[in-house]
Amino acid sequence: MSVTVRVPAKVNVQLAVGAARPDGFHDLANVFLAVGLYDEITATPADGLRITCEGPDAAHVPLDHTNLAARAAQKLAERHGRPADVHLHITKDIPVAGGMAGGSADGAGALLACDTLWGTGATRAELLDICAELGSDVPFSLVGGAALGTGRGEKLRPLEVGGTFHWVFAVADGGLSTPAVYAEFDRLNEAVEVPEPLASEPLLDALTKGDSTALAAALSNDLQPAALSLRPSLTTTLTTGRTAGALAALVSGSGPTTAFLTRDADSAANVAQALLTSGTCRSARVAVGPAPGATVLGRSLPTPTTLEG
Protein backbone atom coordinates (compact mmCIF):
# COMPACT_ATOMS: atom_id res chain seq x y z
CA MET A 1 0.00 0.00 0.00
CA SER A 2 1.08 3.59 -0.56
CA VAL A 3 -0.22 6.71 1.20
CA THR A 4 -0.21 10.24 -0.24
CA VAL A 5 -0.45 13.34 1.96
CA ARG A 6 -0.90 16.93 0.77
CA VAL A 7 0.63 19.77 2.83
CA PRO A 8 0.23 23.55 2.37
CA ALA A 9 2.71 26.42 2.24
CA LYS A 10 2.46 29.24 4.77
CA VAL A 11 2.78 32.99 4.88
CA ASN A 12 3.60 34.86 8.07
CA VAL A 13 1.08 37.69 8.26
CA GLN A 14 2.94 38.82 11.37
CA LEU A 15 6.43 37.81 12.41
CA ALA A 16 7.51 39.60 15.59
CA VAL A 17 11.04 38.56 16.60
CA GLY A 18 12.56 38.93 20.04
CA ALA A 19 16.22 39.14 20.99
CA ALA A 20 18.45 36.09 20.61
CA ARG A 21 18.09 33.63 23.50
CA PRO A 22 21.05 31.87 25.17
CA ASP A 23 20.29 28.77 23.05
CA GLY A 24 20.59 30.84 19.85
CA PHE A 25 16.88 30.80 19.04
CA HIS A 26 14.55 33.82 19.20
CA ASP A 27 11.19 34.10 20.92
CA LEU A 28 8.50 34.84 18.36
CA ALA A 29 4.95 36.03 17.97
CA ASN A 30 4.37 34.33 14.65
CA VAL A 31 0.95 34.53 13.03
CA PHE A 32 0.79 31.77 10.43
CA LEU A 33 -1.70 31.55 7.57
CA ALA A 34 -1.71 28.40 5.43
CA VAL A 35 -2.16 29.07 1.70
CA GLY A 36 -3.10 26.90 -1.24
CA LEU A 37 0.31 25.98 -2.64
CA TYR A 38 1.02 22.36 -1.83
CA ASP A 39 3.66 19.66 -1.70
CA GLU A 40 2.58 16.03 -1.83
CA ILE A 41 4.45 13.24 -0.06
CA THR A 42 3.84 9.62 -1.01
CA ALA A 43 5.02 6.89 1.37
CA THR A 44 5.55 3.35 0.04
CA PRO A 45 7.04 0.32 1.81
CA ALA A 46 10.72 -0.24 0.99
CA ASP A 47 13.78 -2.19 2.16
CA GLY A 48 15.27 0.96 3.70
CA LEU A 49 14.75 4.71 3.91
CA ARG A 50 14.85 6.40 0.52
CA ILE A 51 13.90 9.95 -0.61
CA THR A 52 13.08 11.02 -4.17
CA CYS A 53 11.75 14.34 -5.42
CA GLU A 54 10.25 15.92 -8.52
CA GLY A 55 8.94 19.36 -9.42
CA PRO A 56 10.29 22.92 -9.62
CA ASP A 57 13.71 23.26 -7.95
CA ALA A 58 13.73 19.55 -7.08
CA ALA A 59 17.48 19.55 -7.78
CA HIS A 60 17.96 21.74 -4.70
CA VAL A 61 16.13 19.36 -2.33
CA PRO A 62 18.47 17.15 -0.24
CA LEU A 63 17.81 13.45 -0.69
CA ASP A 64 19.72 12.26 2.38
CA HIS A 65 19.06 12.11 6.13
CA THR A 66 19.15 15.93 6.40
CA ASN A 67 15.79 16.15 4.60
CA LEU A 68 13.05 16.83 7.17
CA ALA A 69 10.90 14.13 5.56
CA ALA A 70 13.62 11.55 6.25
CA ARG A 71 14.10 12.82 9.81
CA ALA A 72 10.33 12.64 10.42
CA ALA A 73 10.23 9.00 9.33
CA GLN A 74 13.22 8.14 11.51
CA LYS A 75 11.81 9.82 14.62
CA LEU A 76 8.42 8.13 14.27
CA ALA A 77 10.06 4.75 13.66
CA GLU A 78 12.33 5.14 16.71
CA ARG A 79 9.38 5.98 18.97
CA HIS A 80 7.50 2.88 17.87
CA GLY A 81 10.43 0.47 17.79
CA ARG A 82 10.36 -0.30 14.11
CA PRO A 83 12.73 0.24 11.17
CA ALA A 84 12.22 3.33 9.03
CA ASP A 85 11.75 1.23 5.92
CA VAL A 86 9.93 3.57 3.55
CA HIS A 87 10.30 5.26 0.18
CA LEU A 88 9.18 8.90 0.48
CA HIS A 89 8.51 10.60 -2.84
CA ILE A 90 8.09 14.38 -2.67
CA THR A 91 6.20 16.23 -5.39
CA LYS A 92 7.34 19.83 -4.90
CA ASP A 93 5.22 22.86 -5.65
CA ILE A 94 6.17 25.05 -2.66
CA PRO A 95 9.23 27.23 -3.42
CA VAL A 96 12.49 25.77 -2.09
CA ALA A 97 14.29 27.91 0.54
CA GLY A 98 11.67 30.58 -0.13
CA GLY A 99 10.36 31.46 3.33
CA MET A 100 7.13 29.49 2.83
CA ALA A 101 8.00 26.44 4.98
CA GLY A 102 8.42 24.00 2.10
CA GLY A 103 10.88 21.82 4.01
CA SER A 104 8.71 21.95 7.11
CA ALA A 105 5.69 20.94 5.05
CA ASP A 106 7.57 17.90 3.77
CA GLY A 107 8.48 16.91 7.33
CA ALA A 108 4.88 17.16 8.52
CA GLY A 109 3.57 15.39 5.43
CA ALA A 110 6.05 12.53 5.75
CA LEU A 111 5.18 12.12 9.42
CA LEU A 112 1.46 11.78 8.72
CA ALA A 113 2.08 9.55 5.68
CA CYS A 114 4.31 7.16 7.66
CA ASP A 115 1.93 7.08 10.62
CA THR A 116 -0.88 6.12 8.24
CA LEU A 117 1.20 3.61 6.26
CA TRP A 118 2.64 1.87 9.31
CA GLY A 119 -0.52 2.03 11.40
CA THR A 120 1.43 3.33 14.37
CA GLY A 121 -1.69 5.04 15.74
CA ALA A 122 0.18 8.08 17.04
CA THR A 123 -1.99 10.63 18.80
CA ARG A 124 -2.27 14.19 17.54
CA ALA A 125 -0.26 15.31 20.56
CA GLU A 126 2.53 12.84 19.75
CA LEU A 127 2.67 13.95 16.12
CA LEU A 128 2.87 17.60 17.19
CA ASP A 129 5.61 16.74 19.67
CA ILE A 130 7.68 15.11 16.91
CA CYS A 131 6.96 18.10 14.65
CA ALA A 132 8.34 20.46 17.31
CA GLU A 133 11.52 18.35 17.52
CA LEU A 134 11.93 18.65 13.75
CA GLY A 135 11.66 22.44 13.53
CA SER A 136 9.82 25.59 14.56
CA ASP A 137 7.48 25.72 11.53
CA VAL A 138 6.72 21.99 11.28
CA PRO A 139 3.84 21.87 13.81
CA PHE A 140 1.90 24.50 11.86
CA SER A 141 2.38 22.59 8.61
CA LEU A 142 0.56 19.68 10.26
CA VAL A 143 -2.27 21.86 11.63
CA GLY A 144 -2.84 24.43 8.84
CA GLY A 145 -5.56 27.07 8.87
CA ALA A 146 -4.30 30.01 10.91
CA ALA A 147 -2.49 30.01 14.23
CA LEU A 148 -0.40 32.11 16.57
CA GLY A 149 2.97 30.51 17.20
CA THR A 150 4.93 31.47 20.31
CA GLY A 151 8.17 30.22 21.82
CA ARG A 152 10.24 29.39 18.73
CA GLY A 153 6.93 29.32 16.83
CA GLU A 154 6.18 25.72 17.75
CA LYS A 155 3.60 26.47 20.49
CA LEU A 156 0.38 26.98 18.56
CA ARG A 157 -2.94 28.62 19.35
CA PRO A 158 -5.48 28.16 16.53
CA LEU A 159 -7.03 31.38 15.21
CA GLU A 160 -10.43 31.97 13.65
CA VAL A 161 -10.49 33.34 10.11
CA GLY A 162 -13.70 34.95 8.90
CA GLY A 163 -13.11 34.93 5.16
CA THR A 164 -10.82 34.14 2.25
CA PHE A 165 -7.66 36.14 1.58
CA HIS A 166 -6.19 36.41 -1.94
CA TRP A 167 -2.42 36.37 -2.32
CA VAL A 168 0.28 36.56 -4.95
CA PHE A 169 3.72 35.12 -4.23
CA ALA A 170 6.70 36.29 -6.26
CA VAL A 171 9.37 33.59 -6.34
CA ALA A 172 12.92 34.92 -6.53
CA ASP A 173 15.94 33.30 -8.13
CA GLY A 174 17.90 31.36 -5.55
CA GLY A 175 17.10 30.99 -1.88
CA LEU A 176 17.94 32.63 1.42
CA SER A 177 19.25 30.71 4.40
CA THR A 178 16.98 31.16 7.42
CA PRO A 179 19.93 31.06 9.87
CA ALA A 180 21.70 33.70 7.76
CA VAL A 181 18.66 35.99 7.88
CA TYR A 182 18.38 35.63 11.65
CA ALA A 183 22.11 36.34 11.97
CA GLU A 184 21.63 39.50 9.93
CA PHE A 185 18.66 40.44 12.15
CA ASP A 186 20.95 40.12 15.17
CA ARG A 187 23.64 42.22 13.48
CA LEU A 188 21.20 44.98 12.53
CA ASN A 189 19.82 45.07 16.08
CA GLU A 190 23.01 44.59 18.10
CA ALA A 191 22.87 48.16 19.47
CA VAL A 192 19.07 48.14 19.93
CA GLU A 193 16.93 46.86 22.80
CA VAL A 194 14.65 44.41 21.00
CA PRO A 195 11.13 44.46 22.51
CA GLU A 196 9.25 41.37 23.62
CA PRO A 197 7.37 39.92 20.61
CA LEU A 198 3.61 40.31 20.94
CA ALA A 199 0.77 39.47 18.58
CA SER A 200 -0.97 42.47 17.00
CA GLU A 201 -4.57 42.72 18.20
CA PRO A 202 -5.65 44.71 15.09
CA LEU A 203 -4.17 41.96 12.91
CA LEU A 204 -5.91 39.16 14.83
CA ASP A 205 -9.17 41.12 14.63
CA ALA A 206 -8.75 41.54 10.85
CA LEU A 207 -8.28 37.78 10.45
CA THR A 208 -11.36 37.05 12.53
CA LYS A 209 -13.46 39.46 10.46
CA GLY A 210 -11.99 38.41 7.11
CA ASP A 211 -11.17 42.07 6.40
CA SER A 212 -8.47 42.28 3.72
CA THR A 213 -8.04 46.05 4.00
CA ALA A 214 -7.54 45.92 7.77
CA LEU A 215 -5.20 42.93 7.45
CA ALA A 216 -3.13 44.80 4.86
CA ALA A 217 -2.67 47.70 7.27
CA ALA A 218 -1.48 45.36 10.03
CA LEU A 219 0.93 43.04 8.15
CA SER A 220 4.47 43.06 9.55
CA ASN A 221 7.68 41.06 9.40
CA ASP A 222 10.60 41.90 11.69
CA LEU A 223 12.90 39.80 9.48
CA GLN A 224 12.16 41.91 6.39
CA PRO A 225 14.97 44.46 6.93
CA ALA A 226 17.46 41.61 7.33
CA ALA A 227 16.22 39.85 4.19
CA LEU A 228 16.38 43.11 2.20
CA SER A 229 19.88 43.75 3.52
CA LEU A 230 21.00 40.38 2.17
CA ARG A 231 18.95 40.64 -1.04
CA PRO A 232 18.41 44.38 -1.90
CA SER A 233 16.77 43.52 -5.23
CA LEU A 234 13.65 42.38 -3.38
CA THR A 235 12.83 46.04 -2.73
CA THR A 236 12.09 46.47 -6.44
CA THR A 237 9.82 43.42 -6.42
CA LEU A 238 7.87 44.77 -3.45
CA THR A 239 7.45 48.16 -5.13
CA THR A 240 6.30 46.55 -8.38
CA GLY A 241 3.53 44.61 -6.65
CA ARG A 242 2.28 47.61 -4.71
CA THR A 243 2.25 49.75 -7.85
CA ALA A 244 0.23 47.05 -9.62
CA GLY A 245 -2.54 47.33 -7.02
CA ALA A 246 -1.63 45.04 -4.12
CA LEU A 247 -3.13 46.16 -0.82
CA ALA A 248 0.16 45.38 0.90
CA ALA A 249 3.48 43.65 0.26
CA LEU A 250 6.03 42.00 2.51
CA VAL A 251 8.81 39.45 2.51
CA SER A 252 7.42 36.01 3.36
CA GLY A 253 9.14 34.75 6.50
CA SER A 254 12.90 34.79 5.99
CA GLY A 255 12.45 35.25 2.22
CA PRO A 256 13.31 35.60 -0.53
CA THR A 257 9.72 34.95 -1.68
CA THR A 258 7.66 38.14 -1.48
CA ALA A 259 3.95 38.11 -0.65
CA PHE A 260 1.24 40.46 -1.92
CA LEU A 261 -2.20 40.68 -0.34
CA THR A 262 -4.87 41.66 -2.87
CA ARG A 263 -8.52 42.63 -2.74
CA ASP A 264 -9.91 39.75 -4.82
CA ALA A 265 -9.09 37.13 -7.46
CA ASP A 266 -9.09 39.61 -10.35
CA SER A 267 -6.69 41.91 -8.54
CA ALA A 268 -4.44 38.95 -7.74
CA ALA A 269 -4.30 38.00 -11.42
CA ASN A 270 -3.39 41.58 -12.38
CA VAL A 271 -0.63 41.79 -9.76
CA ALA A 272 0.79 38.43 -10.80
CA GLN A 273 0.88 39.50 -14.45
CA ALA A 274 2.58 42.79 -13.60
CA LEU A 275 5.23 41.00 -11.55
CA LEU A 276 5.95 38.53 -14.33
CA THR A 277 6.13 41.27 -16.96
CA SER A 278 8.49 43.35 -14.82
CA GLY A 279 11.15 40.67 -14.75
CA THR A 280 11.71 41.26 -11.03
CA CYS A 281 10.92 37.64 -10.10
CA ARG A 282 11.27 34.16 -11.56
CA SER A 283 7.58 33.29 -11.24
CA ALA A 284 4.39 34.61 -9.64
CA ARG A 285 1.94 32.26 -7.96
CA VAL A 286 -1.67 33.03 -7.01
CA ALA A 287 -3.13 31.33 -3.92
CA VAL A 288 -5.84 31.79 -1.31
CA GLY A 289 -5.82 31.26 2.42
CA PRO A 290 -6.58 29.79 4.82
CA ALA A 291 -5.87 26.25 3.63
CA PRO A 292 -6.15 22.97 5.54
CA GLY A 293 -3.08 21.39 7.12
CA ALA A 294 -1.55 18.02 6.25
CA THR A 295 -4.28 15.85 4.73
CA VAL A 296 -4.29 12.22 3.63
CA LEU A 297 -5.40 12.29 -0.01
CA GLY A 298 -5.69 8.57 -0.38
CA ARG A 299 -4.30 5.10 -0.06
CA SER A 300 -3.61 2.71 -2.92
CA LEU A 301 -2.87 -0.99 -3.16
CA PRO A 302 -0.43 -2.45 -5.67
CA THR A 303 -1.98 -3.69 -8.90
CA PRO A 304 -2.25 -7.51 -8.71
CA THR A 305 -0.25 -9.50 -11.23
CA THR A 306 -2.04 -12.20 -13.20
CA LEU A 307 0.10 -15.26 -13.96
CA GLU A 308 -0.76 -17.27 -17.03
CA GLY A 309 0.46 -20.58 -18.31
Image (tube, rainbow, N blue to C red):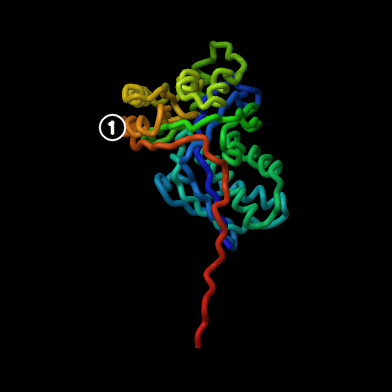
Identify the residue at the far left of this view: 277
Q: Where the N terminus falls, by quadrant?
A: bottom right
Instruction: Give the quadrant of residue 31.
Output: top right
Q: Is residue 98 visible?
A: yes
271 over 55 or under it: above or below:
above
Query: Looking at the image, which residue is at 57% across and 32% down?
Result: 146
Q: Position of residue 195 (x, y in %)?
A: 59, 14
Name the secondary structure under disc 1. loop
Q: Amino acid at mark 1?
A: Gly
Identify the residue at the far bottom of this view: 309
Q: Nearer the viewer, residue 210 or 117?
A: 210
Q: Position of residue 302 (x, y in %)?
A: 54, 67
| 152 with respect to 178 (left or right) | right
156 over 105 or under it: above or below:
above
Q: Nearer the viewer, residue 216 or 20?
A: 216
Instruction: Give the quadrant of residue 174.
Output: top left
Q: Residues within 10 Å of mark 1 (few under 14, many from 20)?
A: few
Query: Looking at the image, which residue is at 69% across and 43% down?
Result: 124
Q: Position of residue 25 (x, y in %)?
A: 61, 27
134 over 12 or under it: above or below:
below
Query: Looking at the image, which residue is at 66% across and 31% down?
Result: 155
Residue matched to label 1: 279
Instruction: Give the quadrant of residue 271.
Output: top left
